[in-house]
Image (cartoon, coloured by chain):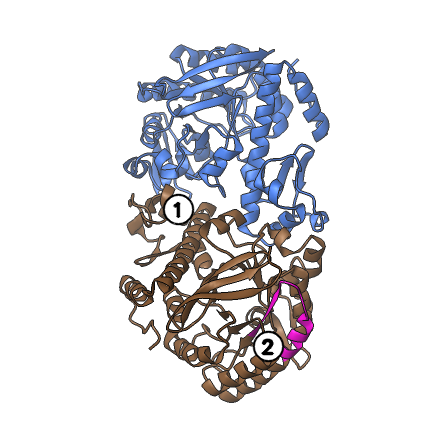
Chain colours: A brown, B blue
Amino acid sequence: MIQRFAFEVYATVGAARTGVIRTPRGEIRTPAFMPVGTAATVKAMLPDSVRATGADILLGNTYHLMLRPGAERIARLGGLHTFMGWNGPILTDSGGFQVMSLAKLRKIAEDGVRFQSHIDGAQEFLSPERAMEIQRLLGSDIQMVLDECPAFPASEAQIEASLALSMRWARRSKAAFGEQAGRACFGIVQGGEFPHLRKRSAEALMEVGFDGYAVGGLAVGEGQSAMFEVLDATGPLLPSDRPRYLMGVGKPCDIVGAVSRGIDMFDCVLPTRSGRNGQAFTRWGTLNLRNARHADDRAPLDPECRCPACRDFSRAYLHHTVKANEIIASMLLTWHNLTYYQDLMAGLRDAIVAGSLENFARSCTQNWGTTGQLLSD
Amino acid sequence: MIQRFAFEVYATVGAARTGVIRTPRGEIRTPAFMPVGTAATVKAMLPDSVRATGADILLGNTYHLMLRPGAERIARLGGLHTFMGWNGPILTDSGGFQVMSLAKLRKIAEDGVRFQSHIDGAQEFLSPERAMEIQRLLGSDIQMVLDECPAFPASEAQIEASLALSMRWARRSKAAFGEQAGRACFGIVQGGEFPHLRKRSAEALMEVGFDGYAVGGLAVGEGQSAMFEVLDATGPLLPSDRPRYLMGVGKPCDIVGAVSRGIDMFDCVLPTRSGRNGQAFTRWGTLNLRNARHADDRAPLDPECRCPACRDFSRAYLHHTVKANEIIASMLLTWHNLTYYQDLMAGLRDAIVAGSLENFARSCTQNWGTTGQLLSD
């Protein structure tokens, strides 16, 4: 077992690259998609099933876990991996984004953010030091710095001020992370849609020095082309020997476009949340299984898919169980969607090795009917 | 593959017996517990997982399936087995009980029962002929006659009148069932708590001649001792070479007591519904995982249980996911409870073969702290 966190690039095509992140808990093939395991479970999935979809790493949410069941409790119970029955690597966010999107009565100050729990209204506090302490208690393999996430849209002045605070917090986060054998600490580039602010952020983070660099503050409503512009501007600023993680992204076409711009890691609730809402991702786009046109369809979702939903059931069955609000519909569609996402990532990795990323992206675009500019110029 | 429905008894202890029901779709080891797959799914379980618990046969609900997705649709889609991905035997009820407990504006007449769907208020009609037609369309391996289920409590006169109608319907059901190679048709003994009415019902059914005999109208509020009295009186009336099925029962101690009185088959929503409500069955009784005392408990539900909930997770994890309303809690606790029930049935079968049913029942009683009279005198 290796004891160091390491990243190795095997092949590149333009800005895109494929490789592996090595951790003591296992390897992460990149580009990687991380299913979201918010409250110590990938919703509607058992850990073995998540592994069977091809996932190498999960994401856990500091905000949710600190509120329930509590970081100290999880530490007493042996850490998050043992608690949730997942023995592969786990990346945890810092809680900053959820504090902004879920918590009540937020008060941001230099030392940290005070807020009320959305579960029971309890007073809570998150600082860079506490965010890192929680992630250490959870036993997280990749820990994220606490940053301040401005609401979208925001003015340049607001983003500049927020960025300055986030960079001070990044330094404090790294100091609090200290040295943890085999574990990594990632910085988060902020700066909205302003290239000079993204540059300032990237430089400030590199001065501190992180094991990987995330791009934050995207997929918040700016649209795909704005997001790709930020990636085009930000990617070249980041060290090529460290993993790059695009937080909270995204749709399959977002991922293809971001991979072509040099991103190595992704997380998003889309496959799991869509699955619980009766939506399936397929090679031809999304299907809403609630639609009556599936009621008599004996065909599987996708005859070439290897997941149980496609192997053992018809679209008619999925339609019926979605309509009847049966738990099995959430189980099967989540499994299918995660399989779809992992197979997409495997396809991207193979295409980079084969030097055929452009063809791969074009065939995705044609199948989905996407009109946007997927590939970086 | 055998083409006939057949029942063979291997061993007996007093009235209790163990054996096997052979069907073209597979063998059913008796005494058998049938998980309930109401709307073409055992809630929160994939079919492979149901099989892994040890279940040989499922129960499907005619009432639910006729309303949604519809019997003709399921037939077009290849039958219930194909539709729901379960290749073992399926027993279907006739819909009579659910019409009484779920439907609105019921009107019972000689020809059948008119009612409104609880889903969309649509006018529906169920007669003995239609109930059997639906079960044939579903492809059910064991089909139940339509009976009229009086509300509990009911007077002797009410039960007598209801019984007379049910026996006329039983004759019509059997005639409508006709001959179906490898499939069985079961009659249902009614008569409330009145031994002479149970006798009249059993005799009327035997005159028609069925492949198996169910005991209906129990577990509706009469209490365990009244139920056992009915079984003591009814069991000896029924032919010993046909399976006996106690409908809708029950708690583990009900099952042990009923097996000792000669019952071969059971179905009940208790293990699945309790699982979704955070309750677990264990050798020591039931546990409410919602209870805060489990929050820091690293122990599994039952260290000797072979299910994933016990193998991979702690009571603390189950508590957390129950509290957070996570789907995985329903998945794990349903899996555990069905495993518990199947292991109970396996224990009963082994105890009958070994001649140690009395010891087995006594140890169950001691562990559960049950005070009732489990064994038949």
Does residue A175 show up magenta in the picture? yes
Residue lying at the far bottom in this picture: please name it. A157
Which stretch is magenta? A169-187
Q: In front here: B256 or A281?
A: A281
Of badges 1 and 2, the one in the foreground is: 2
- For mark 1, name the chain: A
Q: Quadrant of the C terminus of chain A?
A: bottom left
The vertical placement of A263 against A333, above or below, is below
Q: Residue at x 43, y 12 (%)?
A: B206
Q: CA distance from mark 1 to mark 2?
A: 44 Å
Q: Quadrant of the N terminus of chain A?
A: bottom right
Q: Residue at x 68, y 56 (%)?
A: A74
Q: Residue at x 66, y 77 (%)?
A: A172
Quarter of the figure with residue A107: bottom right
Task: Give the residue type that dot 2 points to.
Answer: Gly
Q: Position of residue A150 (x, y in %)?
A: 54, 79
Q: Would residue B129 appear left or right of A126 to someone viewing this image?
A: left
Task: Give the residue type that dot 1 points to.
Answer: Ala
Q: Position of residue B37 (x, y in %)?
A: 45, 36
Would residue A204 be seen by someone viewing this image from the given angle? yes
According to the image, label 1 marks what residue?
A: A309
Q: In front here: A374 or A269?
A: A374
Is label 1 in a helix, a strand or a loop? helix
- For mark 2, name the chain: A
Q: Position of residue A354 (x, y in %)?
A: 34, 62
Earlier residue among tags 1 and 2: 2
According to the image, label 2 marks what residue?
A: A209
Does residue A78 show up magenta in the picture? no
Q: Would residue A237 appear left or right of A298 to someone viewing this image?
A: right
